[in-house]
Structures are given as structure tokens and as C-alpha cells.
Image (cartoon, rainbow, N blue to C red):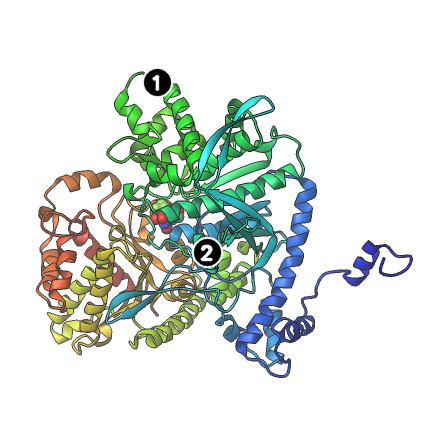
Amino acid sequence: GFVAGKSKTDRMFELMDGFLKNDPDSLQKDILHHVEYTVARSRFSFDDFEAYQALSLSVRDRLIERWHDTQQYFKKKDPKRLYFLSLEFLMGNVINLGIRDQCAEALSQLGFEYEVLAEQEGDAALGNGGLARLSACQMDSLATLDYPAWGYGLRYQYGLFRQIILDGFQHEQPDYWLNFGNPWEIERVHVSYPVKFYGTVKEDTVNGKKCKVWIPGETVEAVAYDNPIPGYGTRNTINLRLWAAKPSDGYDIESYNTGDYINAIVNRQKAETISNVLYPDDRTYQGKELRLKQQYFFVSASLQDIVRRFKDVHGNFDDFPDKVALQLNDTHPSISIAELMRVLLDEEHLSWKKSWHILKQVFSFTTHTVLPEALEKVPIDLFQNVLPRHLQIIYEINFAFMEELKRKIGQDYVRLSRMSIVEEGAVKNIRVANLSIVCSHTVNGVSRAHYELLKTRVFKDFYELWPEKFQYKTNGVTQRRWIVVSNPSLCALISKWLGTESWIRDIDILTRLREHASNSDLQKEWMMVKKINKQRLAEYIETMSGVKVSLDAMFDVQVKRIHEYKRQLLNILGVIHRYDCIKNMEKTEREKVVPRVCIIGGKAPPGYEIAKKIIKLCHAVAETINNDDDVGDLLKLVFIPDYNVSVAELVIPGSDLSQHISTAGHEASGTGSMKFLMNGCLLLATADGSTNEIIEEIGEENMFIFGAKINEIPALREKDSSNNAPLQFVRVVRMVRDGYFGFKDYFKLLCDTVENGKDFYLLGSDFASYLEAQFHGDACWQNGMLGNT
Ligand code: GPW
């Protein structure tokens, strides 16, 4: 005991009786404490970065309290837990604690500015694009809605590359984001599990029963790093547990000389490479060993953690499906299916029948694409080498599935081979999507249009077999990041006019703004907010690209990953057309032109040649237009480099019009559009993905919808594409081809993608309709219907 007559618990309570206080005074004390003792700088002299560290650590202390309470509460309650497995998360800074103002006041008395310190923090870019940001929005909502949820993922040392533009070309720079430490994470040196790779499978007998034993060729340790995620307006604080690879100890090194010894240590250290770097090519799968090892590494560690938590409370596995839900974010974590089966069979020694019965109740699978190149296929040789036991299990699952299927559909071998988990051919592959569908109780799409395509095209065979498995949940985004944090002025306006902040938890309450929509005071205030945000964006543009833009111009924005199907090229060709029109006008006619600032931003996958050429074209065209005195403020084109979550927070609130112009039938959902909409920005869009739901919600008359519809695409592709393209299209492509913007040779391949009978993404056939929608946008702007004052 610490003090005579008192229990240890009493003493603990005495020392820590209550929560940390959130008033500015208490916060100040904590900040200074962390400056002095954690950051180890003198409290009499510390800079912005050190103040940022101390502030973060003080906030982290408060997060930890909530986290402990949440865990304690759920441990007692033992509810069914929702585990969200994802290889990618794009979180952004911590929000929702509701102590921003107190922190700001505490800091200002110490001589620091909250906003300046906030800029000290870089993005944790542990993801590529929409899929990763959706994961983050989902975590925020799960926390806010009091779910007992956990996120699991990988703690990459290098996040998504930083995009540098030199002479208009994209260059990639490593994003070693942990260089200056990460004050938000909690390293759990004791929460660690061994993860096995390679080796062989042996037959064995345990308790008189035959079983398989996997003798691994390599073992790597997975160490947990916890990232607490607070909900808004609740103490529920959930956890994002990210795994880092470390060499595992407990293995002797056999060495006969110093060289052996040194080499053995160096080799051991290579274990860490597993969690080193995020793959930057979203939507294309390249059967690489490191990628498979990353997937298995995070899945194996997560399942060991989940099974341990379950076994803490439960004596057998009967209740497992009532206590555990495993949500697969695309096929990236799907190897967890074979892994759970292996754990139940080989480690828990359950029968195949029992294991399978449990297995098929716990997984649900979200798919995020319709693009065939994004569907993962792992070459069998690779699988056999890295995960020999899992391959056996998958073969066995597939055998049972094929037998069941034969009973249902007979000897239709063409169909059987299409649906098989194992793809036969020159190179045999595991079709990870097929494995996921066969073993999940639910397969869900991310918009209604996506769901329809899953049923009729992508997974048609499976839909016909198991229609009840298929459903969809149209994607959403959290207003807590995309209004409250990124647009504080709009947040205040909304709360004022609604007379409540309840919309921050319940987004449907926003519809009550309709009652005030025609109120001219509200309209004026709304315009003021937009002006402030445009001002901020204009300053950013000037710093980043040196281009001065007019606040009276319409800010027209397309920001997202660069892909041919997203058609940034269509946008640029439209800008060239606009430029060409202005050049060919009489001076008096120019007065009627609606001034525009066209803004494009996004990263190209490093190996995607055409996407990189699109970025260069944007810069080449910008160079010509922005320096043409005939044009002046009537048209500017700017590329915003290194688009990421924090850049999005700045760009989106300052936009008047935004473009979501994928070829119909290619964007599974799209989520950017929703972020723009909730910031009062209109959409110029094709009827693709979730845009269809938006049309239903707000009406086509409030949007600029153009282009071919999903069901028209196949016929258009059949036609000779050059017949579909209007003269204006031929003309602008010719300008690029002929070197009007320089780099003639370099742009040849790019021009070829939309001409010479190709144009797979149908830019030519949508061009006239695109220009019309743009023209309609100008007309609305002129009538004051689109935000100008
Ligand atoms: F190919 N998405 C993404 F389906 O950002 F896996 N990265 C990806 O690798 C894939 C999809 C994958 C996006 C979709 O393109 C977008 O339409 C959707 O809104 C988003 O995922 C979230 O569902």
C-alpha cells in the first residue's frame, strides 16, 4: 500500500479523481506541463512547433480519458462489435472534442495563435482517394452515433507521395510523415502479435484428430498504434488501430563470424519494410508480393486481436457471429476470410463444418468499383509461396462452392469457370472478389447505379445465384469535417438561421433551411461567407502558382485523383474551347463573357502515363491562357499542386461550380460532389454514380447535368467514335496536336486516346452536351442565380 490503511485503489482515486478540465486556465497549465516535461523545452522559450506539440499532447490526454471510459463501458456491456478492415484511411486532423475555442484562448494568452499552430500539422496521408476518405468519414459517424466500432489498418511510414510540379510535370516526393513524430498516436508496445509468412504445411494429429500445421519461413511482429477518434457531442471515442511491422525476437541468430552476425541483423531489420509504404496506384492491381504481404500482415494481426478480445469473455466460438462483424473495405482485406478459417480449423481445432458455419455469418463486403482492372487477382504461384496454408483453404472453399453450384445450375462449365474463385489459364489466379462474395453474407455497392451495374454486369452470375446477398448503401460524407471544420463561417450561419446546432449530428435537419431560402438577408450573408472563402482560396492560389485571380470570377473546380474515366481531359478541352471563343470575339462581345477561374487539382498514379500527360497539358494550356492579354480576367486556368485533405478543406468552401464528369457507368459513387454541395457550390455533372441520388434530392433544375446516360454507353462505343465527335471537339484536339500549347510530340499519345477511332471514355460524343451545360452555367451566373452578387 502507498499509505497505511488505504487500499491501492483508494489511493489511485485520490490521485486522479475526475477528468481533466477544459477551461483555458487548465488547458494552459497542461500545455506548459507538456512543453517542460514531454517536449522538454523550457517553458520560458518555445516556438510554434513546440507549442503545437504541447497542445496536441494536452488534447491527447483528454482523448485518452474518453477512450478508456469507452473501452470500459463496452467491455462490461459486451455488445456485438463492428470491425472495419481497410488498407487505407485519410483521416485529417482530430475534430469533434468541442474545445477548440478554449484551446484558442489558452494559446492566445501564451502568445500563440491556434490557426498558426494548426498549420504545423501535416496530413497523415495513409490513403489514395475517395475510398480512403470514405473510411475516415465512416469512422467519424460511427463514433458520433455511439457504435462499438474499431477500425483496423496499416501504419505506413511513407504515406501517399507528395506531388511536386516542375515545368508542369508531376514529380513524386516521399512523404515521410513521421519525421517529426505523431503526437496523436498511442504506441502499444505490449499489444503485438507474430505474423507468419512462407514455409510449408505439415500433417499432424492433435487429440487423435488429423490437422494441418503451418511451419512458417518468416515471422514478423505487428505492433499496435492506436488513434482515438472522438464522436461529436458524445463521450464515445472509438479506436483506429494501425499496425507497424517490427522484427520479431525470440529467434537465435546462427553466426560463425562477424559478417554473418551483421548480415543476420540487417536481414531481420528488413521485416519493417512490410509497413513501409502505401501503394499509390488506386484502382489498378499489380500482383506484387509486397502488396500481398501487407494485406496479410494487417489482417492476421487484426484477427488475432479480435479473437483475443472475444476469448477474454467467451469460452467457445458459438457466439462469435453474435459478437463480431467484419466489414471488408473492398477486396484489400479479403484474405481475412481464409485467415479466420485457418484460425478456427488449425488453431482452435473446430471442424470444417462448424468453422464454415461461423465464417459465413461474420463477413460483409463493400465493393467500390466497376472497373475490371481494379479487381484483384493474385497469381497462384505468389499465393503458394507466401501463404501456402491459405491457398489450401481457398481451394477447399472453392471445391465446396463448385459442387454446390453444379447441383444448382448443372454442368454449365462456361458459367462455372466464370464464377470459380480460381481462374484457370496461362497464369492461374485467385479472384479475390469471387472469394469475398462466396464467403460474405452481404455484398454491398456504394450507390444505386453501382448496385444496378453489380447485378447486371460486374457480378451478374453471383446476383442470379444469391440475389438476397446484394444491396447498396449510397455513400455519404460527414458535415462535421466538410462544414463545421472546413467552413466555420457557414457553420455559424446555418446554426443561426436554424436556431439550433442539432444539424451537426443529424444532417436531415439541414432541409429546414428551405424555409428561409428566399430570405434576402440569408442570401446576403451566404454570399458574404462565399466571398470570404473565395478570398482565402485566391490567396492560396497566388502563393502556390503565382496567378492573381479575380474574386468576381466564377470559381470552377475539379479536384480528385487523375484518371481517364474521370475525364479531366474533357474539362481542359472545354477550357481550350472557351479560350478559342474569346480569342475569336470582337472586343465589344468580350464584355458579355462571364469571367472564370478554372481550377484543377489531383495526383496521377506514378506509373499512369496518360494521367501524367493530362497534368502537363493543364499546365501548358494555363501558361498560354494566363499570359494572354486578350483574355485577362475573363479566363484563368490554375493547377493546384499536391491535392490532399487539408487542401480540400480550403478549396471546397471557395468554389462556385464543381465538376464531376466521369463517363456514365464508371464512377461507382463519387463523394466529392457531396462536400461541394454542402458548401453551397453547384454541380456540373454526368448522371453517374451517386449523382443520380443527388438529382432526386435536389432536382435536375438545380444542377447542370449533361452527357450520355449509363444505358446509352454500350451503343455509343459500338459506333465509330469519330462520327460522334462534333467539329468543335476536332478543332480543340487539333490545336493540342499541332503544338499550339507546345510539347507537340509529348501530347501525341494523349490526343490519340480520344481520336483515331478510340475515345473509349467518349469525350467526343459528350463534348457538345458538355459545352451546353457550361453555357447554361454562364447564363445562370449572369442572372445572379449562381452565387455572384
Ligand atoms: F478500385 N475508389 C477509390 F474500387 O478511391 F478499389 N480507390 C479505389 O481503389 C477504388 C475505389 C477501388 C473510390 C471510387 O472510385 C469512388 O467512386 C467511390 O465514391 C469511393 O471509392 C468510395 O466508395
**Residue drawn where x is 57% and y is 41% of the image:** 306
Give the vertical position of 696 relative to 556 (above or below). above
Which corner quadrant holds the C terminus?
A: bottom left
Mark 2 beta carbon near ligand 1 (under 8 Å): no
Q: Please, what secondary structure does the residue beneath circle 1 have? A: helix
Q: Say what amino acid the circle numbered 2 marks.
A: Asp
Corner quadrant of residue 615: bottom left
Nearest the camera: 492 or 112?
112
Q: Say what amino acid the circle numbered 1 marks.
A: Lys
Q: Position of residue 684 (x, y in %)?
A: 29, 55
Give the vertical position of 191 relative to 45 (above or below). above
Position of residue 556 in the picture relative to residue 89 (left or right): left
**Residue drawn where x is 55% and y is 73% of the image:** 114
Give the vertical position of 282 relative to 110 (above or below). above
Q: Position of residue 6 (x, y in %)?
A: 88, 57
| Classed neighbour count for the residue bearing mark 1: other residues with Cα under 10 Å, few (<14), some (14–19), many (≥20) | some
Nearest the camera: 32 or 523?
32
Q: Please, what secondary structure does the residue beneath circle 2 have? A: helix
Q: How many marks?
A: 2
State the residue position of label 2. Answer: 260
Of the two numbered discs 2 and 1 on the same chain, state the one appearing first in sequence: 2
**Residue drawn where x is 53% and y is 75% of the image:** 49
In this view, the mark in front (2 or 1): 2
Q: Position of residue 452 (x, y in %)?
A: 33, 36
Position of residue 32 in the picture relative to residue 589 (left or right): right
CA gap, disc 2 and disc 1: 56 Å
Position of residue 547 in the picture relative to residue 470 (left or right): left
State the residue position of label 1. Answer: 406
In this orientation, does residue 131 appear?
yes
| Classed neighbour count for the residue bearing mark 2: other residues with Cα under 10 Å, few (<14), some (14–19), many (≥20) | few
